[in-house]
Image (cartoon, rainbow, N blue to C red):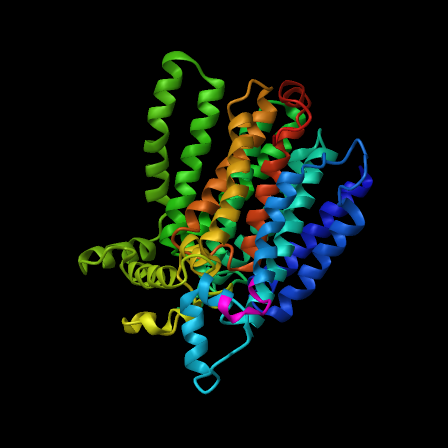
Amino acid sequence: MIRAFFVLVATGLILGYATLRYGGVLAADWNPCALALGAVLLLGYLPIDRDSDSAPVEWLLYAAVLAVPAWAFLQTIPLPFALVALLSPERAAMTHALLRFEPNPGAVPLSIRPEATLQYALRYLAFGATFLITRDLMWRMPGRQWLIAVPPVLIASLQAVVGLLQNTSGLATVAVSGTFVNRSHFSAMLEMCLPFAVGAVFCYAPHARRALAACVGAVCATLLLVAVALSLSRAGFAIALLSLILLSWLHAIARLRGTGRMIVVAGIPVVAAVCGISLASGRLLDRMAFQLTAGHFPFDKRLLFWRETLRVITAYPLTGCGFGGFVSAVTPWRTAGVTRTLDYAHNDYLQFTAEGGVIGFVLAGIVGYLLVRVLWRNVFSSTNFRDNGLAFACATALFAGMIHSSVDLITYVPATGMLLCWIAGMVAGLDSNVALRQNIGQHPWT
């Protein structure tokens, strides 16, 4: 138990450092974090023995988690040109254009930017390490699993405090973004941690000794929600409110019966809407109103990004252009001036498919499928309410991150990508509940 606590603290410090360094967007800031995560996993929690306290060895899950970085590494390996031309005709055409005086290019990698792809392979390995660490912690701390959510909530709360200080600076040029590059990355971290803070209020309020945890959760939840509103992130604020509605619904369905459940379930969206209107600052409402009065859809610019990304997917359908190669691959199809200086598609799913191809998308989809199976078993299981409360919080936090990934960057910012994998690891470890293990056996992934 003591070793598990130190591993939790070490992993939390790594996440805190990445967050402090602008989200770890620079390789010089993120690479030490990746090495540290690998060291924590290898020295503390690589589940290769028969320790009864550690998570059971699930080879299907391990293979699925490690398949994405393995595919990224494979994209950097020079392959025979004939094979590359068969797998990725667009990549072969690009090679011919660059080496027009060389009739036989020899071996070339699938990635159009191998050095960037290698960096992403290391990043995905670090994400996988985070996933395995938090999954194992769920098994090693069966009676204290809520503690695993404390480091992210604490880091997010400190970010919220920084955001509030930025808001009170009085300078119009100072954006509420904490230590992140922009408001979207900032709000993404806060909204993913919000369900755990609110979940603590639901799960710990009734008892006197746990009332302190409920009060701390309420304070953190208030800080997070207010900071998201002040960040002026439209997507972040909307997703935060949707998360609160979903979490409240899950708890209402679990705790109430009959007419009372129907009334509460119907009233939750109304209460959330009233709270949202009360919290939304004038500037946030102005941002929304400006789009509408100008006749623009709130995500009209992103539609341009996504349309151009689809062109890349069409050009590199099977193997992708290589992780990290999107900005180079999309250049021939950039027609709108507003998109010419942007490096990302502002949709993780589209950009991941453009860079990893159908192969990368399927590999990531397998991990998602395994997580959905665990969530289904735990959210709708008949275990005690406290265990369900953590499952509700994990499901809602994962929902927030996955929804935000469809309109902005999550996994392409190391700190928020690591947080999403932290939450996913907690989801994978929900099967550590003893009663549930007895019902589904020792190998829930099969």
Q: Is residue 318 left or right of residue 7?
A: left
Residue 404, given in percent of the width and then of the height, sits at: 43, 49
At x 39%, y 12%, the residue is: 258
Viewer-side residue, 410 vs 74: 74
Given residues 422 and 156, the one toward you in this image is: 422
Viewer can see residue 159? yes
Where's residue 182, x and y in %? 46, 63
388 within the magenta span = no
What residue appears at the point 68 percent right and 56 percent down from the top-left corner? 14
Q: Determine the image quadrant of residue 266.
A: top left
Question: How far across and how far down the image is residue 72, in percent?
Answer: 57, 60
Q: Farthest residue toward the bottom?
A: 101
| Res. 141 image quadrant | top right
Q: Which residues are magenta?
A: 75-82
The total of numbered circles placed on residues is 0
> Does residue 223 appear in the picture of this structure?
no
Quarter of the image for residue 46 reads: top right
Whether 145 is drawn above or below 66: the answer is above
The C terminus, quarter of image: top right
State yes or no: residue 78 in magenta: yes
Q: Residue at x 66, y 19 (%)?
A: 435
Residue lying farthest to the top in this orientation: 258
Whole-percent x, y for residue 1 in the image:
80, 37
Left or right of residue 245: residue 165:
right
On screen, residue 279 versus residue 61, left or right, reads left
